[in-house]
Amino acid sequence: MDSLITAAARALAAGDPLGALKRVALRNDAPALALRGIAMAQLGDLVRAKALVRSAARAFGAHEAVARARCVVAEAEMALAARELTWPAKALEAARATLEEHGDRVNAAHARYLEVRRLLLIGRLDEAERKLASLDPTPFPPALRAAHELVVAGIAMRRLRTKPARAALERAARAARDAHIPALAAEVASASLLLDAPAARLLARGEERLLRLEEVEALLASRALVVDACRHVVRDARTVVSLARRPVLFALARALGEAWPADLPRGTLIARAFRAKRADESHRARLRVEVGRLRRMLRPLAGVSATPLGFKLVPRRAREVVVLARPVEEEHAAVLAFLADGESWSSSALALALAASQRTVQRALDSLRAAAKVHSFGRGRARRWMTPPVPGFTTTLLLPAPLPGDLG
C-alpha cells in the first residue's frame, strides 16, 4: 500500500473526508476508489459513494477477498445511513466471516454492528441483543467502542431501561471524545437528547402532562393500571395484556381508562369504538358483545362493570387507572416517528420498520405530503422521504415492536 493510500485511510479514520480526497481524488485504482467512496459517504453524497465503492469491489481481483469484503461492509453502512433496510443481510454476514477468517477483527466487528443497528431500527430487539452479546468492545478503537455503546443505549431505551441507557451514553461520549471525530460526538449528543425529550403523555382524571422516558419507566413499575396507547396494551407492574390486534377492544379500554374513576355512557363508547355518529339497536348489541370480550381479555387486571349510564373499569390490584398516549396523536403518527430522525427513508424501509405493507405506507406518505408534513426527492426506487425533526412528534422509543407473527 503506497503512502498516499495510507494517509487517505488515516484521514478517513479521523473523520477528515476532505483530507482523504486531496490525496486520492484523481486516482482510479481500486484502493483509491474505495477510499473516495467512503469519503463521499462521510460528506453525505451517498449515491456517488455507493457507485464508487461498487466500482472498487469490481476492480479488486478475486484473490483480494479482504478488500472486497470491506467494500461490502462499506456499502452496507451507506445503505443503513440512507435507510435502505432491505439490503441483503447474507452478503454482509459472508463479508463479516471473510474478515474474521483473515484476522481483520475491527472491520468484522463493524459489520456486526451494522447488522445490530439494522435490527434495532426495525424493532427486532431480542435478535439485536443476541448478536451484540458476541462482541467485547474493550480491544476496539474509540470510534468502534462509541458505536457499541450507542447500540447498547438504543436497545436499553427501547426496553425502557433508562439508567443503563444513560450509562452507555456516557461511555459513548468518552469514546467519541477519544476518537476526535466531531460527527460521532454529535451523534452521541443527539441520542442523549432523547432521554430528556417528551416520550409520552399521561392522561388521568381529566388532566394530562408530558412524560420523559424515565418517568414512563417509573409509571410502568408503579401500582397503576396503565392503558398504554403507545404499544396498545393494558398492563400493571406484573401483567401485560396485548390488544394490538384488537383495535375495537383497545378503543373501549382506552375510553374507559380516560373516564376512570367515573363510568362512561353507552353512546360515548359506541362513538369511540365504532365511530358511529348515531347509535341504534345494532350498535348497542355489538357493544354488549365487545364489552364481554374485553372483560375476558382483561380478567387478570380489571373488571368491566355495567352501570345505569354505561360501563366502568374496575381495577383488581391497581390503585388507579391512567392512559399513556403518544406526545402528539394524529393519523400516520408512527410514520412521522421514524421520519422525525431527520434521515431520508424509502417507503420499503418504512414498511419493514413498521411491519406494514408497502402500499399502506405509501398511502400514508401521500397523505402526509398533501398536508405538507413530509417531502420527497428522487424517483422510482430512488425516492426518499423525510421531514425535519420537530419537537413533540411521536418518538420511536415507545412504538410497538413487531409481533411474533409479523416477523418474516
Image (cartoon, helix red, strand yellow):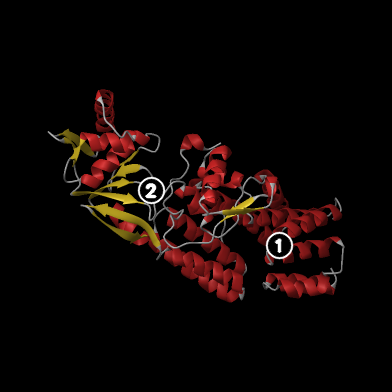
Q: Quadrant of the C terminus?
A: top right
Tell me if residue 353 can be seen. no
Q: Residue at x 48, y 42 (%)?
A: 402
- Give the amino acid type for the residue marked by disc 2 in the picture: Cys
Residue 256 visible in the displayed image: yes
Which label is found at residue 230? 2
Name the spot of residue 285 as percent of width and height, x first: 25, 24
Tell me the SS state at disc 2: loop
Q: Residues within 10 Å of mark 1 (few under 14, many from 20)?
A: some
Q: Determine whether 281 is above or below 216 in the image.
A: above
Q: Quadrant of residue 217?
A: bottom left
Measured from the top left, where is residue 87 in percent x and y? 66, 46
| Secondary structure of the residue carrying numbered label 1 | loop
* Residue 45's disc number: 1
Instruction: Point out the image quarter for the N terminus.
Output: bottom right
Question: Residue drawn at (22%, 51%), measured in percent from left and top?
Answer: 223
* Label 2 packing within 10 angstroms: few (<14), some (14-19), many (20+): many
Location of residue 357 by image quarter = top right
Coordinates of residue 200 in the picture (x, y in percent): 36, 56
